[in-house]
Amino acid sequence: MHLYGTQAINEQGHLTIGGTDSVELAKNYGTPLYVYDIQLFRDRARAFQQTFKEAGIGYQVAYASKAFSTIAIYQVAAEENLSLDVVSAGELYTAVKAGFPVGKIHFHGNNKSLEELQMAFRVGIGCIVVDNFHEIDLLKKISEQNKQSMNILLRVTPGIEAHTHDYITTGQEDSKFGFDLKNGQADDAFNQTYNHGYLKLIGLHCHIGSQIFDTSAFQLASEKLLQKMSGWKQEFGYICPVLNLGGGFGIRYTAEDAPLKPAVYVKKMIETVKQTSEDLGYPIPEIWIEPGRSLIGDAGTTLYTIGSTKEVPKMRKYAAVDGGMSDNIRPALYGAKYSSLLANKANALSTEQYTIAGKCCESGDKLIEQADLPTVEAGDLLGVFCTGAYGYSMASNYNRIARPAVVFVENGMSQLVVKRETNADLVKQDLSYSQKAIQK
């Protein structure tokens, strides 16, 4: 059994997280319940930053908050001196409501609207990561109308295919993201922005994928981007002070996964950037990275109550929980795998294998295909590990199922940070039908 962060098993045989008993958490807050180990989040944030500090190199570590976006986690991120990566007006609004330092917010996205970009200028964020030529036109229009400067980075696709799922690979040439390095788009974007009066080009950005377990792709991306930056220096005398290598650092969902420690990824990046810069005669840029899943993924555990069970002779046994694809779409979306245990019987030997089924009306609503567990009974508490990234943030009201509550645990204390939705919440945006209201 692999436990994460502050997880442990107490004398009652219950899973504990952050010094709190999961059985008590379920009693107090109900299930399904997202539980976040905030100490683990803090430890990861500090580990990424410490490596840069020890190397004496300029850096920013930005939390890629699409993984999990709430007021409370933004406030913790600010406490840990992180920058913030947002990808929508909603995430930006949440960050502002959280009191996050706006100068440390980076705005991403492949189809930012005029209204979103205007909002970014209005609140005065730190930089915008530019994704396409349409966005350049919008930024020129807004900045010139407002007579307001904005730092920008150009997102490029370096033509590197990280070894990950097709849906979460983003650095290859055929991608909806960024300007391609190979076909000249990146050069065209540079020419349109580098000497603009209000748009301040400060660097290049790439993101090559997710759940990456080695450093070679990051090293290759570093070399390619620095070569391009060096070429612009030679041709135009222009030096980009920032190299943003994105995120994608893997975590351990199951025993099949073998992620590296944060320091290993960062050290290799630093070594490559320093050596390549020296070889090219280019000033060493600041290195920015954007961990999301690797900060928050294994800090999250979802607690479910088991209900019905079913055995299909000579095939499989099912155990159904009170949540499913409505609170974790990843298994149904791209076959994501998870590990689990009975949180109320954590010391019991695993003697059976179950398929953990959700309660949604979809045959594909299966959270775990093969979960090794003790014999389960209705009312048992199932803990599914590493649900901190893309669980809550991708949750839906499919089948009109209310989204779960979110609890932070730390130092033996628990805090509700997102209320459980109610049935009344599900209909609060609905309007009644009226024949008279139909317009011709």
Image: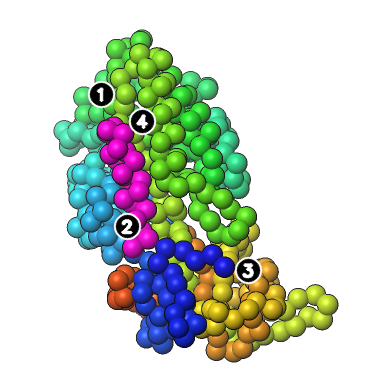
Element class at badge 4: strand
Label 2, label 1: how many angstroms apart (C-alpha)? 39 Å
Number of other residues with Cα within 10 Å of mark 3, as a class: few under 14, some 14 to 19, many 20 or more: many
Asked if residue 90 is among those painted magenta in the image, a careful observer would answer no
**Residue 11, position as x, y percentages in the image:** 45, 83
Range shown magenta: 39-62
Is the C-beta separation of discs 2 and 4 under 8 Å?
no
Q: Nearer the viewer, residue 80 or 308?
A: 80
Q: Would you name the residue on which mark 4 appears?
A: 243
Element class at badge 3: strand
Number of other residues with Cα within 10 Å of mark 4, as a class: few under 14, some 14 to 19, many 20 or more: many
Label 3, label 2: how many angstroms apart (C-alpha)? 28 Å
Element class at badge 1: loop
- The mark nearer the N terminus, 3 or 2, is 2
Label 2, label 4: how many angstroms apart (C-alpha)? 24 Å
- The mark nearer the N terminus, 2 or 1, is 2
Number of other residues with Cα within 10 Å of mark 2, as a class: few under 14, some 14 to 19, many 20 or more: some
Asked if residue 40 is among those painted magenta in the image, a careful observer would answer yes
Q: Would you name the residue on which mark 3 appears?
A: 368
- Residue in the picture at 46% in, 24% down: 223
* Horizontal side of residue 143 vs 367, given as left or right: left
Q: Would you name the residue on which mark 2 appears?
A: 42
Label 4, label 1: how many angstroms apart (C-alpha)? 20 Å
- The mark nearer the N terminus, 4 or 3, is 4
Label 4, label 3: how many angstroms apart (C-alpha)? 39 Å
Is the C-beta separation of discs 4 and 1 under 8 Å?
no
- Tell me which amino acid carries mark 3: Ile
Q: Would you name the residue on which mark 1 appears?
A: 196
- Tell me which amino acid carries mark 1: His
- Tell me which amino acid carries mark 4: Leu
Provide the major secondary structure of the magenta segment.
helix
Label 3, label 1: how many angstroms apart (C-alpha)? 52 Å
